[in-house]
């Protein structure tokens, strides 16, 4: 077996990128420690240790990554951001590089950007009723879809699948504000938020609404102003698709109640709330025991589970009476869906515990 040349920094960097792509990792984490450079891959959303590169090669590896990303190689006390074009390292993905100073030394995260088409709603593997609700919403001319769930629960992928659906539906002017734009979709007008340059979500959204879109996609509602713009836009004959950090469907309404003074506007604008998680599925090569292709984690790939509330007259009555905390999912809840995956041996009890708690 040919072992890769790991005697010099360029070869180490190329080898790490190739291995990360091979296992399907989303990020490469390089953390300087007392022993050298600790390398970990993010696989299925979680970090898995890979190896430690000994000094002095460790420092050269960091230098090489910074050089490729056109960053200041001597600078390790302030964060820097850059990109590496895939051609430069023979990779299949474009790479986004972020450096952070930490107490034990510099940390670099290399993110692998997929250029593949986003999955269709069918390919997302959402439970069928949740998918039906999404499609029903997307065919409507107006109203707001709110996706919720913790970081890494697949909200962005769901948004991209919705965008793909709208793209195929055609005839709609779709505008997005994202932080950052992760994939470029033909026919959709996408804008990057740039907080450093003062282009915030509310500013970008207000500016872009002058283009008179039919659909406005906001990557995230982070502040009251954005929440109010989203509600107003959905009430004035537009479709709005966005995400809000909350743990449940009820919590989404609780947060909106705080963020938007006009509660009746919230109640009338929200059409669908989807609360999702990603459940890691057992590695098929080793049946969950751990092997090289799953970095000994036993998992390969993830499937979404999602509970939702479609806001109908009954829900509006309930919300109108101030009962946002009592809004219940319309179909199977997250736990019921997780247990269904367990029954089919797609996942493990430990994984369900990790995702949903006790
Ligand atoms: Zn395996």
Image (cartoon, helix red, strand yellow):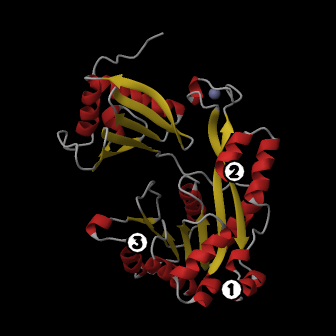
**Which residue is farthest right?**
343
Q: Nearer the viewer, residue 26 or 248?
A: 248
For the residue labelled by badge 1, is the local secondary structure a helix, a strand or a loop?
Answer: loop
Q: Earlier in the sequence, mark 2 or mark 3?
A: 2
Q: Which mark is residue 322?
A: 1
Q: Earlier in the sequence, mark 1 or mark 2?
A: 2
Q: Please name the residue shown 19% across and 43% down the image.
A: 75
- Residue under label 2, please give it: 125
Splitting the image into 4 quarters, where does residue 104 fall? top left
Decide if residue 123 is in sight here.
no
Q: Residues within 10 Å of mark 2 (few under 14, many from 20)?
A: some
Q: Position of residue 260 (x, y in %)?
A: 52, 84
Q: Please name the residue shown 73% across and 75% down the image.
A: 326
Q: Position of residue 9 (x, y in %)?
A: 28, 25
Splitting the image into 4 quarters, where does residue 202 fall? bottom left
Q: Please name the residue shown 65% across and 63% down the image.
A: 275
Spatial CA distance of label 1 from label 2 is 34 Å
Q: Residues within 10 Å of mark 3 (few under 14, many from 20)?
A: many
Q: Residues within 10 Å of mark 1 (few under 14, many from 20)?
A: some
Q: Position of residue 207 (x, y in %)?
A: 37, 79
Q: Please name the residue shown 31% across and 46% down the image.
A: 100
Q: Which mark is residue 201?
A: 3
Splitting the image into 4 quarters, where does residue 317 fall? bottom right
């Amino acid at each position: 077996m040919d072992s890769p040349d790991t005697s010099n920094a360029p070869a180490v960097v190329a080898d790490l990128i190739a291995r990360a792509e091979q296992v399907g990792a989303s990020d490469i984490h390089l953390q300087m420690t007392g022993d050298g450079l600790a390398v970990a891959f993010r696989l299925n959303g979680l970090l898995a240790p890979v190896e430690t590169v000994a000094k002095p090669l460790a420092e050269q590896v960091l230098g090489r990554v910074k050089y490729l990303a056109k960053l200041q190689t001597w600078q390790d006390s302030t964060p820097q951001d850059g990109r590496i074009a895939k051609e430069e390292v023979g990779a299949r993905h474009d790479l986004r590089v972020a450096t952070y100073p930490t107490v034990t030394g510099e940390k670099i995260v290399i993110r692998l950007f997929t250029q593949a088409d986003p999955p269709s709603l069918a390919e997302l593997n959402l439970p069928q009723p949740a998918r039906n609700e999404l499609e029903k919403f997307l065919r409507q001319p107006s109203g707001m879809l709110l996706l919720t769930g913790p970081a890494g629960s697949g909200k962005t992928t769901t948004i991209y699948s919705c965008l793909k659906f709208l793209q195929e539906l055609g005839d709609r002017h779709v505008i997005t504000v994202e932080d950052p734009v992760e994939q470029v979709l033909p026919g959709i007008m996408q804008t990057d938020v740039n907080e450093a340059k003062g282009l915030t979500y509310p500013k970008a959204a207000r500016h872009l609404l002058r283009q008179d879109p039919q659909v406005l996609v906001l990557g995230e509602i982070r502040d009251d102003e954005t929440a109010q713009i989203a509600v107003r836009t959905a009430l004035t004959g537009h479709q709005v698709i966005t995400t809000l950090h909350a743990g449940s469907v009820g919590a989404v309404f609780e947060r909106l109640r705080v963020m938007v003074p006009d509660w009746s506007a919230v109640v009338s604008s929200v059409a669908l709330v989807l609360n999702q998680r990603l459940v890691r599925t057992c590695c098929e090569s080793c049946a969950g025991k751990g092997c090289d292709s799953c970095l000994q984690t036993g998992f390969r790939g993830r499937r979404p589970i999602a509970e939702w509330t479609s806001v109908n007259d009954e829900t509006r009555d309930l919300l109108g009476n101030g009962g946002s905390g009592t809004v219940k999912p319309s179909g199977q809840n997250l736990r019921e869906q997780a247990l269904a995956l367990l029954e089919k041996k797609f996942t493990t009890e430990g994984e369900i515990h990790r995702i949903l708690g006790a």
